[in-house]
Amino acid sequence: MAVTEAQPGNERVRGGGKARERILEAAYDLFAHRGIQAVGIDAIIAHSGVARQTLYRHFSSKQALVLAFLERREELWTKDWLQSEVKQRSADPEQRLLAVFDVFDGWFRSPGFEGCSFINVMLEITDPADPIHRAGTSYLVKIRDFLEDLARSAGIADADNFARQWHILMKGSIVAAAEGDQDAALRAQQIATIALRDAKRLEPWSRPLLGKPSPH
């Protein structure tokens, strides 16, 4: 997914581009497809065609560049692609929930399938206190918030719990697709259809989680 939008006030470099955007575009492509630990500053400099001092003028560290990448990933992947595609496919909140997996199905079958960058950075940076790990978590939470809004609009009583379980299906399908199962989204959608039906009947989603005492 190419990064094309420019930001004003940045230094122009060869090709008429702007330095910050060229750096961020290079980082986006490399981090999304190779991961953050496998990509060094030298690779980003070579990919972007800017000088080292130019990169550090715009991004004080690799961590700052990774955080900018994750912010851009939310703009392009979560908002401009996933949420936009889901909303275009139906006006009905229940159908929008199911449409998530239709959107994923096309993604999983694309030659450029790169997995979820938010999950990937959390697996690479495992310290919960690390700013990169926290950022990955926060962007996943925003996706779950989107699901919760849909669930609430669909009349599901425990929208938070439902969204968490729906998100598990989404994340699980991404991992299965990374393993090579191109039908992972369709398999997840089959489970999701049953889950949605049961949620509308207030079962089993309204039941207490295992290990938690019943309030009654």
Image (cartoon, rainbow, N blue to C red):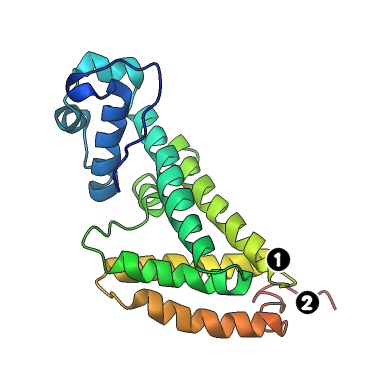
Instruction: Give the quarter of the figure containing the C terminus.
Output: bottom right
Residue 50, image x, y percentages: 19, 21
Q: Amino acid at mark 2?
A: Ser
Q: Residue at x 22, y 22 (%)?
A: 16
> Which quarter of the figure has residue 3?
top left
| Residue behind mark 2 | 214
The vertical placement of 170 against 59, above or below, is: below
- Secondary structure of the residue carrying numbered label 2: loop
| Residue behind mark 1 | 152
Direction from residue 31 to residue 187 in the image, left or right = right
Q: Residue at x 20, y 18 (%)?
A: 52
Residue 76 visible, this angle: yes
Q: Nearer the viewer, mark 1 or mark 2?
A: 1
Residue 115, image x, y percentages: 32, 58
Direction from residue 57 to residue 75 in the image, left or right = right
Residue 37 visible, this angle: no
Which comes before the other along the chain, label 1 or label 2?
1
Of the pair 14 and 66, the residue shown nearer to us: 14
Q: How crowded is the residue under tag 1: few (<14 C-alpha within 10 Å), some, or many (20+)?
A: some
> Which quarter of the figure has residue 90?
bottom right
Q: Are marks 1 and 2 in contact (CB under 8 Å)?
A: no
Q: Amino acid at mark 1?
A: Arg
Exactly how many numbered labels are in the figure? Answer: 2
Of the pair 100 and 206, the residue shown nearer to us: 100
The numbered disc on residue 87 is none
Q: Residue at x 31, y 28 (%)?
A: 21
Residue 38, image x, y percentages: 21, 42
The vertical placement of 199 against 105, above or below, is: below
The vertical placement of 161 against 23, above or below, is: below
- Secondary structure of the residue carrying numbered label 1: helix
